Amino acid sequence: MKVGLKLWSVNTDFYLKEAEILFDKGVFDYVELYVVPNTLDTLNQWKALKTPFIMHNAHFAHGFNLAKKGNKARNRKIYDETKHFADELKAQYIIFHGGIDGTPEETAQQLAGFGESRALIENKPFVALPNKMGGNFCRGATFTELRSIINEVKCGFCLDIGHAVCSANSQHKEPYGFIKELLTLNPAMFHLSDVTDMTSPYDAHPHLGTGRLDISWLKNNIFPHNAVISVETNKDNKQNLDDFVKDVKWLKSLS
């Protein structure tokens, strides 16, 4: 199992130094870096962190929406910044969200247009968070949409467990059965947090072992022995990553 620390490109104060210390201690194996638009000035600081990297392209909250044709020029500009980070940091993958509203066909067309061999599409909840995202329905929430996008783009897949639970609830599907269905899309990696309410359509990121998700079942039935897993739990302290360390220890302790 390879465990990843999720950070944003703006986290160059306390978290960056903490990451250097924790990587040297063997707490995690790579950084998944979310590239906030217009932060190329931080790149050299991240290059000094001698860890493997996976990139996460900016999503709807930062104006990136593959599902809308009118966003095409802005999407390209944001992607170009992420690509620059990925090239310089020698990232293995670049993760993309499919967008909100619009159409899955537009999502596939724009993502294919990047010609990005490292691209992974991430599954999403069916409905966007109310009063936060400014949209209604997420693209890439259903098995059919994801399969169509993957086949059209010839890209890989990142299976987000919490998002799968949310989408299953919206679709009136059994969550663990839906996760198994998504597993047939051959994910290259996973996102993991716990789930407070296994019936909710809305996404949250509680710490591992604090919710109702059966992570032992996931470890024994879903994750391969060499799984690449980014821990996407909330960070409680802006000056240290102690809660992340606790999450990783908990995950690795499961039989």
Image: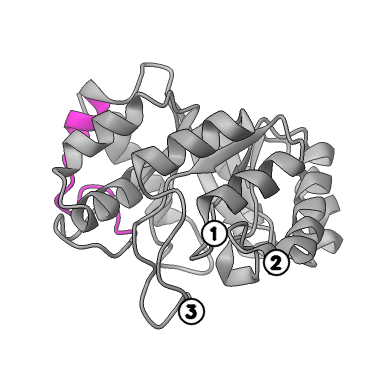
Q: Which residue is mark 3?
A: 134
State yes or no: discs 1 and 3 in contact (Cβ < 8 Å): no
Type of the residue with mark 1 = Gly
In the image shown, does 239 or 185 lie closer to the viewer? 185
At 25% from the left and 62% from the top, the residue drawn is 201
For the residue labelled by badge 1, is the local secondary structure a helix, a strand or a loop? loop
In this rendering, the answer to whether 247 lies above or below 178 is below
Alpha carbon distance from label 2 to label 3 = 15 Å
The answer to which image quadrant residue 216 occupies is top left
Q: Position of residue 76 (x, y in %)?
A: 78, 56
State yes or no: discs 1 and 2 in contact (Cβ < 8 Å): yes
In this rendering, the answer to whether 67 lies above or below 70 is above
Residue 25 visible somewhere in the drawing: no
Disc 1 crowd rating (10 Å Cα; few below 14, some 14-19, many 20+) is many
Q: Position of residue 107 (x, y in %)?
A: 59, 51
For the residue labelled by badge 2, is the local secondary structure a helix, a strand or a loop? helix
- Mark closest to the chain's N terminus, 2 or 3: 2
Which of pointers 2 and 3 indicates the residue nearer the eye?
2
For this orientation, the residue located farthest to the top is 225
Q: Which residue is mark 1?
A: 99
In this rendering, the answer to whether 255 lies above or below 3 is above
Q: Which residue is mark 2?
A: 71
* Left or right position of 169 against 124: left
- Look at the image and say whether residue 124 sits in the magenta stretch: no
At 46% from the left and 54% from the top, the residue drawn is 139
In the image shown, does 99 or 34 lie closer to the viewer? 99
Type of the residue with mark 3 = Gly
Type of the residue with mark 2 = Asn
